[in-house]
Image (cartoon, helix red, strand yellow):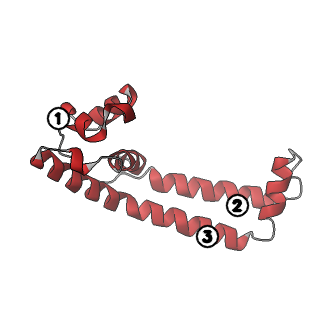
Amino acid sequence: MKVLIVNAIADILAGVKLNKITDKDAKTILVKDYLQLKKAVQKAKETKQELESKFREDWQDEIFEIARLRKEEKSLAGHEDYVEAEADTIKMINDAFLEDVEVEITPVELDTFIAAVGEESLTLETIAFLQENGVIS
């Protein structure tokens, strides 16, 4: 599974209210899955942080000028090296989140998940996404 997908699932599970889950087995499954997912995403998040930090350090003299020019919708002529470095950094970050990672997800029943999260915070798209990726059955 792509890190990007794993991260999205982890973000959704982060909103689960454990005290609302009455099924002890489902609660255990969701906690274990969440911790596994967060661990699988950690390397990509660290890579992203390192690349962003390095970019800011390397280009600190131009960052605010480029931001101003973009805000004013002016040309970035003369800043081609910055734009190229920025694009390269974004590509490396995206590549980190497009890597495949191994995760084993144990699905929980839809009704149990809805009870835990609350109907008001779920959309049909979220339910479909979680079902497609094996989080709910």
At mark 2, the secondary structure is helix
Q: Which residue is mark 1?
A: 109
Q: Which residue type does callout 1 highlight?
A: Glu
At mark 3, the secondary structure is helix
Asked which quadrant contains residue 59, the reply is: bottom right
Residue 113: x percent and y percent?
23, 38
* Lower sequence index among marks 2 and 1: 2
* Badge 2: residue crowd in 10 Å (few <14, some 14–19, many ≥20): some
Looking at this rendering, what residue extends furthest in the front direction? 19
* Badge 3: residue crowd in 10 Å (few <14, some 14–19, many ≥20): few
* Lower sequence index among marks 3 and 2: 3
**Cα separation between marks 3 and 2:** 13 Å
Looking at this rendering, what residue extends furthest in the top direction? 124
Residue 95: x percent and y percent?
50, 53
Asked which quadrant contains residue 131, the reply is: top left
Q: Which residue is mark 3?
A: 53
Residue ID at (41%, 53%): 99
Q: Which residue is mark 2?
A: 85
Residue ID at (40%, 45%): 8
- Mark 2 or 1: in front is 1
Residue ID at (67%, 54%): 87
Q: Which residue type does callout 3 highlight?
A: Ser
Q: Is residue 42 left or right of residue 56?
A: left
